[in-house]
Image (cartoon, grey):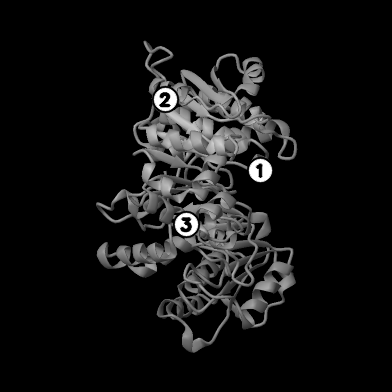
Amino acid sequence: MKTVVSSVQAKELDQYAIEEMKMPSLVLMERAALAVVDALEKKAETLKCVLVVCGTGNNGADGVAVGRILHLKGYDVNVCCLGEEQRYSPELRQQLEIAKKYCVSLVNNPSWNEYTTIVDAIFGVGLSRNVTGFYLEAIKQINQTFARKVAVDVPSGLCSDSGRILGHAVRADETVTFAFLKKGLCLYPGCEWAGETCVADIGIYERKNETPEAYTHAVEWQDVRCLLPKRAENGNKGSFGKVLFLAGSRQMAGAAYLCASACLRSGAGMVKIHTAQENREILQTLLPEALLSTYAEGQADFQMLKEDLEWCDVVAAGPGLGQGPQECSLLQFLLENCAKPLVLDADALNLFGKNPHWAKKLPKTCVFTPHLMEMSRMTGKTLEEIQREPFHSADEFAKRHQVVCVLKDARTVIAVPDGRSWVNLSGNSGMATAGSGDVLTGITAALLAVGEDPAHMAALAVYLHGCAGDVACGRKGDRSMTAQDIIGALPEVFKRGVDKNGEKQSNKGIYIAGRDCAKF
């Protein structure tokens, strides 16, 4: 798994390498600069005339080192330092002194449009306020050029924790970030403004004996075979999980079909749908593999639901369920009588938001899968508040209710009560389509039925859902794909996940330097 760090953690790990591991700061800078130069030289045809724009801190010092190395390799390079000299960090002063001795060209007023590549080394991970003054003007000038733009660690003007644009930011074609991914490079709009992101090993590593919850992680393709529970060769349909769905009210059979179909495509041995009787014929036609138990309008059968709960291994509730009095009573009965792992989605979340006292009824293992609006309804926070701090919002909800919280967005965040968290990097805009969330519910329920750690299964489900979305996008395009296309891609995704000879794939747009990193 990729480790993802906050700005505070990045600085702490940097200091740990210097103070505890006795790695000299200038050595780290040299390795950082070499990593940037290595990335630059992969498109050497763009290096006819290079400008390195540096700030007053250590990010600027990295930039000066980049300029020196390029100069010594024979490239035409200029280095421009912004800011007042008295504010230069000691490392920047030292790098400038070295650069001058090597006769690196230093400029004050560059002609921005004459450069074929601009290296952005103005701000590092610590920026927390809006960009102003001559920094703002320089960033605007950089963005207005046609040059290739490569950012050092993070694009200047980008919040490295939230991915927000702090007034204005460099729109990079590529970003070379050091040691670990930064949270802001994983979230929108930051990941867009960072362009293709390379994580470079420069000699900074996690502390010894660090607890798993210390950092956020991102599932990678090579993790799938480790996390995906193996299927016993002598198993039967009961061995691979019996999943019950409380889903699909009158005229909402589609949601029930999508989650149940996705569940079967994700390896569940048996699926039963507890649904409105109007859906029987539709579901028997669309999904003959599923068992059905139905109720008439105004005649909820609690005894039948209780028997269904005794039959199953996992329950998922909410897709297309409705929010009327009958659905409310069904969900309340479910919460009062369910001791099995439970996935709550869609209307179940909306009903939960209206009945906060239900929090005391949740089973020990419970996964919530809200999108931003559902999260807003349950917490009272505005959409802007949740989007600004998705990690905090998910973590706070998970700890408050002692559940796994899957906060769905373009970049989904997963949090659990013990402090662990994940951010998902798979998927695409085509997945913003009706029924996509129902598909995720089905995948999650299937994995919970056979996995030991609900948190890992939830994170894996989100990742595989995104991978299936990427396959569907490749087949149909992001404008034309549907939720059924995502389900149709699941067999290919799971086949690759267990095939020893399958391709080892990674998340699109982000790669670890030195590793094979083809897209899924």
Residue 120: name its quadrant.
bottom right
Dot 2: what SS? helix
| N-terminal-most mark, 2 or 3 | 2
> Is residue 201 in view from this perspective?
no
- How many marks the image carries: the answer is 3
- Residue 215 in the image: state x and y as whole percent: 38, 54
Say what amino acid the circle numbered 1 marks. Ala
Residue for point 51% across, 43% down: 369
Image quarter hosting the N terminus: top left
Residue tagged 1: 432
Q: Nearer the viewer, residue 199 or 327?
A: 327
Say what amino acid the circle numbered 3 marks. Ser
Q: CA distance from mark 2 to mark 3?
A: 34 Å
Labelled disc at residue 393: 3
Residue 12: name its quadrant.
bottom left
Observer-side mark, 2 or 3, equals 2
**Up-down relation of residue 53 to residue 45 (above or below):** below
Labelled disc at residue 306: 2
Observer-side mark, 3 or 1, equals 3
Q: CA distance from mark 3 to mark 1?
A: 21 Å
Q: Is residue 425 left or right of residue 146?
A: left
- Residue 184 in the image: state x and y as whole percent: 52, 59
**Up-down relation of residue 203 to residue 480 (above or below):** below
**Up-down relation of residue 226 to residue 394 (above or below):** above
Q: CA distance from mark 2 to mark 1?
A: 35 Å
Q: Residues within 10 Å of mark 3 (few under 14, many from 20)?
A: many
Q: Residue furthest front?
A: 298
| N-terminal-most mark, 2 or 1 | 2
Dot 3: what SS? helix
Q: Are marks 3 and 1 in contact (CB under 8 Å)?
A: no
Q: Residues within 10 Å of mark 1 (few under 14, many from 20)?
A: some
